[in-house]
Structures are given as structure tokens and as C-alpha cells.
């Protein structure tokens, strides 16, 4: 039997402290279809992890199992050291996780500021925080944070596409998360817009937020992320730095047939 040295124990402890999200042997079946198949990966504190895979690979299903929208068929999700498998989304939000949606969901009849304000107010605090104007000043700060300071009183429909994405991010940030799941932020954006949004994600990371960014193609993503996990048919096919991912033959094969790396 080998005995662990103090140095090894310190290293192991430092590693586990670094891990904020651990997905282990996650499987999600829809009837006979295995959408996520025994998937394991970890997300480290204050990194931007790219979660990449072709269309239908199982990215949204994994995302939904982490955030509690779906209960996994089997496997576990550990967040900040606690087993959170199957906890509903509102409990995940209370624990510091937030997400954006690919399909925008702002309240169409409220302006930008009100949308962010309402996203950040928990039911029990609604009246109290409204009374003291607390939620409004927080919401304004969040809008400034994401670059919507000149659009506070615009209706969502008046925002350009990039503005809508920023509003989605602001609504997620209004809950003061330490961990942010971002779903396909770059679809339909120009290179300049991708660069500017990437700057925001980097700033959030540098301020202490951990991010997972999901996308089916890698345009814009590889310059932004610290590491990537690539999945196909519900299973992990590669994990590593952007350089390692680009050079990976299995990834290249998965992306043959029209998908862009
Ligand atoms: N609620 C559901 N019921 C049945 N099948 C589902 C459900 N959600 C997803 N699937 C199936 O699970 C598989 C993985 O889908 P998922 O949406 O997770 O992939 P994805 O990688 O997010 O794809 P995309 O990039 O197109 O969003 C697909 O075959 C999909 O049809």
C-alpha cells in the first residue's frame, strides 16, 4: 500500500478547492434515446470553460441537468462541495448559479432596467427592496456592468441582437451569481461584436465569476476560453487547452461534414 505524502495531500486539497462544479457519470435518457452518456468533467474556480459539441451532441441537456431543469437519469452534480443533483433551478440560483437562454425571455412590456430589476428580486424581498429602491440601484449597476447604461429605458424590442444578449447576461447577473452558464452567445454576431462580448466575459471572470460557455461551433470561442470540454453523442471526446482541442483528431473528425471548427 502506498502512503500519500504531505505534498500529495496538499496538492489534492488545492485541486479540490479549485473545483467549483463536478459532473460525474452523468446520464440522461429520453425514453430509449441516451442524450448524455456517462459524462464526467470539472469546472475550476474563476475559469472560462468552453462546452462544445456539434448540433444534437447533448450540450443543452447537460446544461439543463446541471441547472436543475432536468433530473439526471443517473450520475451526480456537485457544486461548491455540495451534492446538488436534481435540485430545482430556483435552489441553484440561491446557491449562486445563473444561466442565460438561447431564446431570449425578457418581459416585452417592461424596459431594460425593469427587466433586470425583476430578474434580481426574490419573491420574499420584492416589497421591501422595492420600497428602499435597492433593486433599482443594483439593476442600474448591473446594466452599466454589461454596457447597457444608455439603454435603460428602451424596450427589449428596441435593442439590437447584441443588446438582447447583453440583457440576457444582465438578467442572469442580477441574481449575483458566482457561476454563470452562457448558452450560445455568439450566434448571429459579427466578429467585432463577438470580440466586445468576449471582453465582458473576461472581465466577469477576472472579477471572480466562473463561466461555462456553450457553443456548437468554435468561432470566437477558442480565443476566449481557458479550457474546453468537447462532447459528441452525449460523451466527452476531448478536454484541454484551446491549442490541444484544435489539434485533437477526434474533434476534427466530429466536426467533418460542414461544421466549422
Ligand atoms: N426533452 C427532450 N425529449 C426528447 N429528446 C430530447 C429532449 N431534449 C433533447 N433531446 C434529444 O437529445 C439529444 C441531445 O439534444 P441537445 O439539445 O442536448 O443537444 P445540443 O448539443 O444542445 O444541440 P444544439 O447545439 O442543436 O442545441 C438530441 O438527439 C435531442 O433530439
Image (spheres, rainbow, N blue to C red):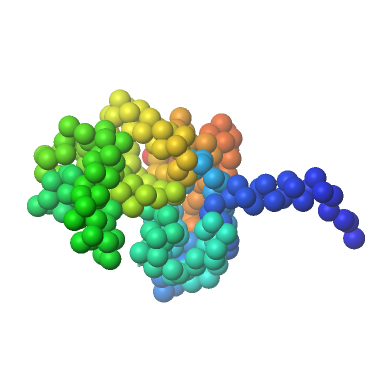
Most foreground residue, 254 or 216: 216
Q: Single out the residue that lies furthest toward the front.
A: 132
Q: Position of residue 253 (x, y in %)?
A: 52, 42
Q: Nearer the viewer, residue 104 or 73?
A: 104
The location of residue 128, given as percent across then percent down, is: 23, 60
Relative to 5, is 258 on the left or the right? left
Residue 67 x, y percent position in the rendering: 41, 60
The picture quadrant where one finds residue 131 is bottom left
Q: Residue at x 33, y 28 (%)?
A: 196
Front one among 12 and 59: 12
Looking at the image, the residue that sits furthest to the top is 192
In which quadrant of the rendered image does the N terminus lie?
A: bottom right
Is residue 225 left or right of 168 when viewed as pictured?
right
User: In this image, 158 relative to 117: left or right?
Assistant: left
Let me know if residue 230 appears in the view.
yes
Q: Residue furthest right?
A: 1
Q: Residue at x 42, y 55 (%)?
A: 96
**Residue 48 x, y percent position in the rendering:** 48, 40
Q: Is residue 84 above or below residue 109?
A: below
- Residue in the picture at 38% in, 59% down: 93
Where on the picture, by quarter, is residue 75? bottom right
Residue 189, placed above or below residue 60? above
Viewer can see residue 238: no
Foreground: 146 or 61?
Answer: 146
Quadrant of the rendered image containing residue 194: top left
Amino acid at each position: 500500500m502506498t502512503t500519500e505524502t504531505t505534498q500529495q495531500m496538499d496538492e489534492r486539497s488545492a485541486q479540490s478547492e479549485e473545483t467549483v462544479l463536478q459532473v460525474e457519470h452523468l446520464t440522461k435518457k429520453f425514453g430509449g434515446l441516451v442524450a448524455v452518456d456517462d459524462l464526467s468533467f470539472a469546472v475550476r474556480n474563476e475559469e472560462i470553460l468552453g462546452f462544445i459539441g456539434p448540433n444534437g451532441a447533448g450540450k443543452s441537456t447537460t446544461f439543463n441537468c446541471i441547472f436543475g431543469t432536468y433530473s439526471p437519469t443517473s450520475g451526480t452534480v456537485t457544486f461548491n462541495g455540495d451534492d446538488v443533483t436534481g435540485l430545482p433551478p430556483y435552489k441553484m440560483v440561491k446557491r449562486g448559479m445563473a444561466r442565460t437562454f438561447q431564446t431570449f425571455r425578457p418581459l416585452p412590456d417592461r424596459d431594460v432596467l425593469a427587466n433586470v430589476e425583476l430578474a434580481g428580486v426574490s419573491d420574499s424581498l420584492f416589497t421591501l427592496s422595492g420600497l428602499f429602491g435597492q433593486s433599482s440601484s443594483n439593476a442600474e449597476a448591473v446594466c452599466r456592468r454589461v454596457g447597457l447604461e444608455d439603454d435603460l429605458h428602451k424596450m427589449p424590442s428596441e435593442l439590437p441582437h447584441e443588446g438582447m444578449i447583453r440583457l440576457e447576461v444582465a438578467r442572469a447577473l442580477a441574481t449575483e451569481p458566482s457561476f454563470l452558464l452562457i448558452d450560445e452567445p455568439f450566434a448571429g454576431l459579427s466578429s467585432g461584436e463577438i470580440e466586445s462580448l468576449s471582453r465582458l466575459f473576461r472581465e466577469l471572470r477576472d472579477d471572480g465569476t466562473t463561466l461555462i460557455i456553450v457553443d456548437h461551433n468554435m468561432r470566437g470561442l477558442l480565443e476566449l476560453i481557458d479550457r474546453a470540454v468537447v462532447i459528441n453523442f452525449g460523451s466527452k471526446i476531448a478536454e484541454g487547452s484551446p491549442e490541444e482541442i484544435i489539434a485533437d483528431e477526434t474533434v476534427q473528425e466530429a466536426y467533418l461534414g460542414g461544421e466549422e471548427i
